[in-house]
Amino acid sequence: MRPSSFRSIRLIVLLILLALSMLLGIAIGPVRLTLAQVIHGVFHPNGSAPNDIIVSALREPRVVCAALVGAGLSVSGAIVQSVFKNPMADPGILGVSAGGTLGAVIALALGWDVASPYVLPLSAFLLAGCSVTIVYLLATRSGRTSLIGVLLAGLVVSSMIGAAVSLVLTLVNNESMRSIVFWLLGGFDGDGWSQVGMIAPPILLGIAIAFFYARPLDLLHLGEDNAYSSGVSVEWTKRVLITLVAVMTGAAVSVSGMIGFVGLLVPHMARRLVGSSHAVLIPASALLGASLLILADMLGRSIDPLFEINVGVVTSFLGGPFFLMLLLRTERKTFR
């Protein structure tokens, strides 16, 4: 069997895994539902039975939201690891996560979130966009964007925003402090179809455009000189890809809060399954990231029916050991 056939089969397996994850994510929680109850709720979104309401109004949008956030963060991670040629890069290096955090913290501290469910994600998304714009301007000289400059500017901007978040935390009352800390832990509690409607267009469109840029990503991963010699407009491609990462990560952070390690962990797992060609790596990362975040969220809310663990805590427990293993492997290669 040809390698392309193996990759196609693995993509189909990942698609089946996503479907099973979504069914489990809807069925398992403080109230356990059978497969028949889940299917009935999915196909009767306006049903008045308690189980139908649980499925259509609570768990279904939450699962879809988790899938979109997982897919967006994972594809963003695959892009930044290839563009920066750094296996330990994740979408946070652009400062977009820090900017989104500051936007959400300001909205929560000032009580804007009670005015409308759209205010908090919009505030997070706008500040995420401002943050990455500052990083991009700092790293661009004479029309050329330095990747090292992006890394350093992202680090500086993230540090300054972190200080601003700490300052806000020292000034708010206890009630606002609790809301902010809960948001910082990351999660999908309270997310509904309105949040799905906000993040679906930028994330799905971003994944589609990233797939269109699969070949330039393959060439950039080999080095900018190779990309130049193959006819790739390197500066334009970098701008498009950095913008894609900023938009997808900003949309994800705006509704989920801080969820670490997904953008770092999933692209490595996907490479082991389907290889490094971005034509298959991008859809594989999207499918695997969506499944992982749905299952992590399900785990967090099903361990104890009276106490929900934020999904950001679950992914940190999963990603911490993986990051340590990756760091040790990189050091062995460096000093060999």
Image: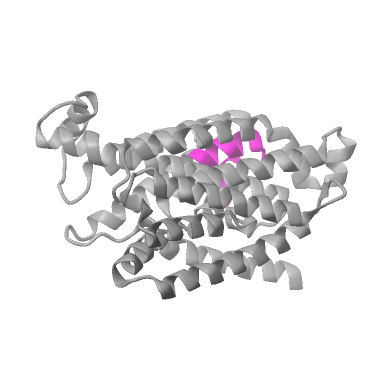
Tally of marks: 0
Q: Main secondary structure of the magenta part?
A: helix
Asked if residue 321 is positioned above or below residue 131 in the image, the reply reads: below
Q: Is residue 94 or residue 32 the one in the foreground?
A: 94
Locate the C terminus by quadrant. bottom right
Q: Position of residue 50 (x, y in %)?
A: 10, 37
Q: Position of residue 45 (x, y in %)?
A: 22, 27
250 part of magenta stretch? no
Q: List the single residue furthest toward the top.
A: 43
Locate the N terminus by quadrant. top right
Asked if residue 17 is positioned above or below residue 108 in the image, the reply reads: above
123 vs 216, left or right, is left
174 vs 266, left or right, is left
Dividing the picture into quadrants, the one containing residue 270 is: top right
Q: Position of residue 300 (x, y in %)?
A: 30, 57
Which span is picked out in magenta? 268-286
Q: List the single residue furthest toward the bottom.
A: 170
The answer to whether residue 210 is seen in the rendering is: yes
x 19%, y 24%: residue: 44
Q: List the single residue furthest toward the left.
A: 49
The answer to whether residue 336 is seen in the rendering is: no
303 vs 255, left or right, is left
The figure's colour scheme reads one colour
272 part of magenta stretch? yes
223 vs 251, left or right, is right
Q: Is residue 63 or residue 16 the one in the foreground?
A: 63
Q: Is residue 146 or residue 7 the one in the foreground?
A: 146
x 18%, y 39%: residue: 54
Q: Position of residue 35 (x, y in %)?
A: 19, 34
